[in-house]
Image: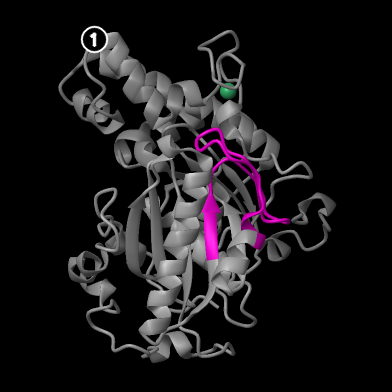
Amino acid sequence: MSGPEQPAAAPRHARAADAPAGDVLAASQESASQESASQESAGHVPAGHVPAAHAAGSQASGAGHALALDVGGTGIKAGLVTRDGRLIRTWRRATRIERGPQAVIDTIADFAAELVDEAAAEGTPVAAAGFALPGIINERTGVGVFSATVGWRDVPFRDLLGARLAVPVAIGHDVRAGGVAEARIGAGRGSARFVFLPLGTSIGGAIMIDGVPNLGPHGMGGEFGHIVVRPGGLPCGCGLHGCLAQYSSAGAVAARYAAAAGTANTGALDVAARLATGDPVARRIWDEAVDVLADALLTTAALLDPDRVVIGGGLAEAGDTLMRPLAEALAAKATYHALPELVTAELGDLAGCLGAGLLAWDLVPGSSVSAAPVSADLVPADPRPGDSAP
Ligand SMILES: [Zn+2]
């Protein structure tokens, strides 16, 4: 049910809406003024008004928006997401993990409750709320099993937040929620099977089949960052050596350059910029990141046969500086493989927030944006028993 009113680029406009960490409830006006696609922001839409484009085709109640929160290690992004997957207002609050897990959990609940109250006061009550959370998440039970970043263990988020907010609550894993957003409204649209690969501080991943994350019976699937691509190579926090994340994450590229060049860590995009200056250290580290990633993608092609790989995270912001040599390296390594199309993600760092909103809408009957299944058309005779989502 994707309609023409869902420009793929719309969430990009809202990306600029992030206020500095700790700047509470301050970003919405900034969001409104950034670009024209964000017209439907607080400053332009009368309270209670639901634009016809959004209401069309919906059988849901009059509730206006889904509330979405994406909890990261430094900041919590929040937004209101329309039925058709547009982020119309955003806020940000610092996570402040140094306070300990319980304080972070309280902040998440308080932040969400404030926004639910505010939306109700403005006449656009929240229909459902979605939360994209880090770490190991059990999406079926809504429990945050473990987060190394924040330090929580076995937190029944869905029950806790459902009781506090009095609206349906969806709990998702941050990367998989991002995969859902890319599948429905981003770079994964129309794909039967793609891999969402955010190259950020580390490397997560989601295997998306007909728009649904396929995470396996243990809920542990998609950890592309810990594919061993250089046996005996760099040590990884997971206990192995030579993991993809130690070479091809934005964090690794930046840290490796800083260590090798003896400079401050100025980020992966700065390393990319140095390639044009002929910096040999930047060249070596960048080329290795690309080569290692191509090896990992060759393994991915062999195992999963995706039609597309959607590359996101900070490293993807290097654009052609990454994507062009990556495609060349992959093509050079391939033998019998049917290679996937390599594309950059479209939703940037708002993918998790948008995905949380879409998962929330899934709880409101008849109102969500679904990714149209396409694999049945491609493989009509094969029941593919392993594909069913858990
Ligand atoms: Zn590892």
Q: Splitting the image into 4 quarters, where does residue 363 fall?
A: bottom right
**Residue at 67% of width from left, 56% of height from top?**
142
Above or below residue 51? Residue 238 is above
**Residue at 40% of width from left, 42% of height from top?**
313
- The secondary element bearing badge 1 is classed as loop
Which of the four quarters of the rendered structure image does ligand 1 lie in? top right
Q: Nearer the viewer, residue 315 or 384?
A: 315
For the record, the magenta segment spans 130-159
- Seen from this angle, which residue lies furthest left? 277
Amino acid at dot 1: Gly
Q: Position of residue 78 (x, y in %)?
A: 40, 61
Colouring scheme applied when the structure was drawn: one colour
Judge whether residue 64 can be spotted in this image: yes
Above or below residue 127? Residue 101 is above
Q: Nearer the viewer, residue 161 or 295?
A: 161
Residue 131 lies in the magenta-colored region: yes
| Ligand 1 has an atom within 8 Å of the beta carbon of the residue at disc 1 | no
Tag 1 residue? 262
In-image side of 159 versus 125 (left or right): right
